[in-house]
Image (spheres, rainbow, N blue to C red):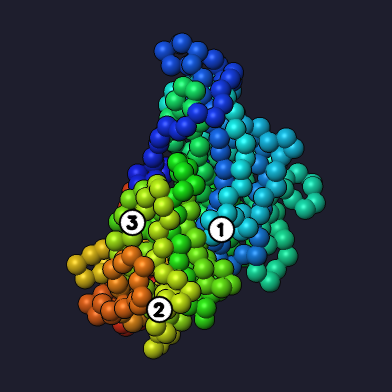
């Protein structure tokens, strides 16, 4: 069974305005009073890398107040999608959400969520599939999701006579894992659960230069080096990051053939959109003077994750790249910019954007691997060739 632990920056909960109430779950409510609330769920996605489609078919969303409750225990409440809904996750980026429905349930704190997917069986096309760029559609192996469901540890507060409105933020790029040269792919879900407090805010809007408005460009909001929301710009260069919990973030733009651009101090509030740039004043990372440096290695077990962090002079630390890990061999690879990243500070309604090169950070990264809650790191300098890296967890 896949057990996904959310980063603490994303493990958030809240109460919401009155919408509906009624029966559901075991009817116990808070302290056995029978008080009821409503849980409403939607799903969205970060951009995917190297795929033209990532399809999942959702049968139900289940929640329980006990984080260790088993599949057959009493006390589950669920949103049932009838018929099951096949969704291409790659259509849900740039602020697009797909509503999954709602259910009445006992008021209280829910600490376990399970996303149940349909079994592939012999159906054509398969309910859960991936289309690698330039290749044919192939079934996506999701054994735990088809049986007991993808299990998430959550912190969802459902108040009496109120609606708890949450979004499953599914990162398809980090969730699809190649299995060696078999031509097969596993689903290794990376999902955050984010409250949707208001359509009036929780949103960052901006533009990158039209010349880099491509699928190889990634825009993310990060907190202490942890991406909170990411997307690719549309054909005009516009990007929308939504929903994002209120707070202050670093905006990171990476694009093939360009240096990394960072805007620090980006505020997100509940009551208004945050605009970081416009079509007339777009973010335009400078072209790289040389090709990026290839960095490769292996990690054991192959279920571990691997990413490249870069610390700017005086902070912050950002995630500069994330590497898929082969599910059979544990192999991973990066292409990391050699040139210095550029940075600026957020300003309201900027009439120009001036990014300054951070020479002290040029080519310097830390490779971080994680497995079962344990971390291992290794600093590297891509100003010169980097020998193959090797990580191993007990």
Judged by depth in the image, the label closer to the viewer, 1 or 3, is: 3
The image position of residue 195, as x and y in percent, is 45, 41
Looking at the rendered image, the disc whose residue lies closer to the viewer, 3 or 2, is 3
Instruction: Tell which residue pokes out farthest to the top in this image.
Output: 33
| Residues at marks 1 and 2, CA–CA distance in whole angstroms | 22 Å
> On screen, 88 above or below 62?
below
Residue drawn at 47 percent across, 32 percent down: 17
Q: Which residue does the numbered mark 3 point to in the structure image?
A: 267
Position of 244 relative to 38 (above/below):
below
Please tell me how crowded label 1 is: few (under 14), some (14-19), or many (20+) other residues with Cα within 10 Å.
many
SS at mark 2 in the image: loop
Residue 174: x, y in percent?
50, 57
Point out the tag, 1 or 2, that comes first from the N-terminus.
Answer: 1
Residue under circle 1? 93
The quarter of the picture where residue 226 lies is: bottom left
Look at the image and tell me whether residue 47 can be seen: yes
Residue on which disc 2 sits: 285
Lower position in the chain sequence, tag 3 or tag 2 = 3
């Amino acid at each position: 069974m896949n057990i996904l632990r959310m980063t603490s920056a994303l493990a958030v909960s809240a109460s919401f305005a009155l919408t509906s109430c009624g029966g559901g779950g075991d009817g116990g409510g808070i302290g056995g009073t029978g008080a009821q609330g409503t849980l409403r769920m939607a799903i969205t996605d970060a951009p995917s890398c190297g795929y033209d489609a990532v399809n999942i078919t959702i049968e139900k969303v289940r929640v329980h107040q006990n984080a260790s409750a088993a599949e057959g225990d009493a006390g589950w409440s669920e949103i049932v999608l009838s018929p099951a809904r096949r969704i291409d996750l790659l259509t849900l980026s740039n602020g697009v959400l797909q509503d999954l429905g709602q259910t009445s349930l006992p008021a209280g704190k829910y600490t376990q969520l399970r996303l149940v997917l349909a079994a592939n069986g012999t159906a054509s096309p398969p309910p859960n599939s991936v289309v690698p760029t330039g290749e044919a559609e192939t079934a996506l192996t999701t054994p735990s999701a088809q049986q007991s469901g993808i299990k998430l540890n959550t912190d969802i507060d459902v108040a009496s006579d109120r609606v708890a409105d949450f979004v499953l933020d599914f990162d398809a790029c980090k969730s699809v894992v190649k299995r060696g040269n078999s031509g097969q792919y596993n689903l290794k879900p990376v999902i955050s659960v984010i409250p949707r407090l208001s359509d009036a805010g929780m949103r960052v809007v901006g533009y990158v230069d039209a010349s880099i408005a491509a699928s190889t460009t990634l825009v993310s909001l990060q907190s202490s080096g942890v991406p909170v929301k990411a997307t690719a710009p549309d054909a005009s260069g516009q990007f929308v990051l939504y929903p994002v919990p209120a707070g202050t973030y670093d905006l990171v733009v990476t694009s093939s053939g360009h240096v990394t651009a960072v805007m620090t101090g980006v505020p997100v509030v509940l009551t208004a959109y945050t605009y970081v740039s416009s079509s007339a004043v777009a973010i335009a990372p400078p072209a790289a003077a040389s090709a990026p440096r290839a960095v490769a290695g292996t990690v054991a077990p192959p279920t571990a994750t691997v990413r490249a962090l870069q610390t700017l002079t005086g902070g912050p630390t950002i995630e500069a790249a994330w590497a898929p890990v082969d599910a059979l061999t544990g192999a991973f690879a990066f292409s990391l910019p050699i040139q210095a990243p550029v940075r600026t500070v957020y300003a309201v309604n900027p009439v120009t954007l001036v990014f300054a090169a951070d020479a002290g950070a040029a080519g310097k990264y830390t490779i971080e691997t994680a497995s079962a809650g344990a971390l291992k790191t290794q600093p590297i300098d891509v100003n010169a060739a980097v020998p193959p890296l090797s990580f191993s967890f007990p």
